[in-house]
Amino acid sequence: MLNDLKAGNGAYKTFLKRYDILKYDFRIFRTAMFKFYKLVGNTKQSASVQCSRIKAKAIEEEIVVNEGTVKQLEEMFREIRLQEV
């Protein structure tokens, strides 16, 4: 995703192009945007605003946007590991 953003493909086009991965957790895209915005000298706040706009546009176009899935999986695996010890 970061390479797509660097190539100038645009944030929303990158979101659509990588939706096969992003459909599981929008936070993956948010992280890529934060890194990209930092590389080009923009603020984290600017990246956050752009992510909110992209998320709103996707929802408006009836694209399912999930958040927190990866975090839930991490917590579940952490609990499993603790039970194994």
Image (cartoon, rainbow, N blue to C red):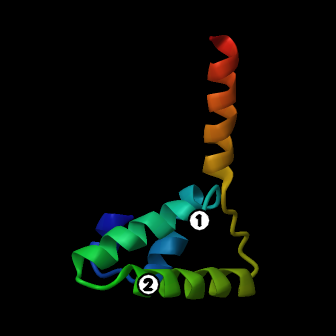
Q: Hey, which quadrant is residue 32 in on the image?
A: bottom left
Query: Foreground: 50 or 79?
Result: 79
In the depicted structure, whether residue 16 falls above or below residue 21 = below
Q: Amino acid at mark 2?
A: Gln
Which residue is pictured at 44% across the width and 84% down the height?
45
Q: Nearer the viewer, mark 2 or mark 1?
A: 2
In the rendered structure, the answer to whether residue 46 lies left or right of residue 80 reads left
Quarter of the image that includes the N terminus = bottom left
Q: Residue at x 23, y 74 (%)?
A: 39
Instruction: Quadrant for residue 57, please give it.
Output: bottom right
Q: Is residue 77 above or below residue 55?
A: above
Mark 1 secondary-structure assignment: loop
Residue visible at 68% across and 46% down? 72
Image mark for residue 45: 2
Measuring 71% from the left and 74% from the top, which residue is drawn there? 63
Q: Nearer the viewer, residue 14 or 56?
A: 56
Residue at which label 1 appears = 26
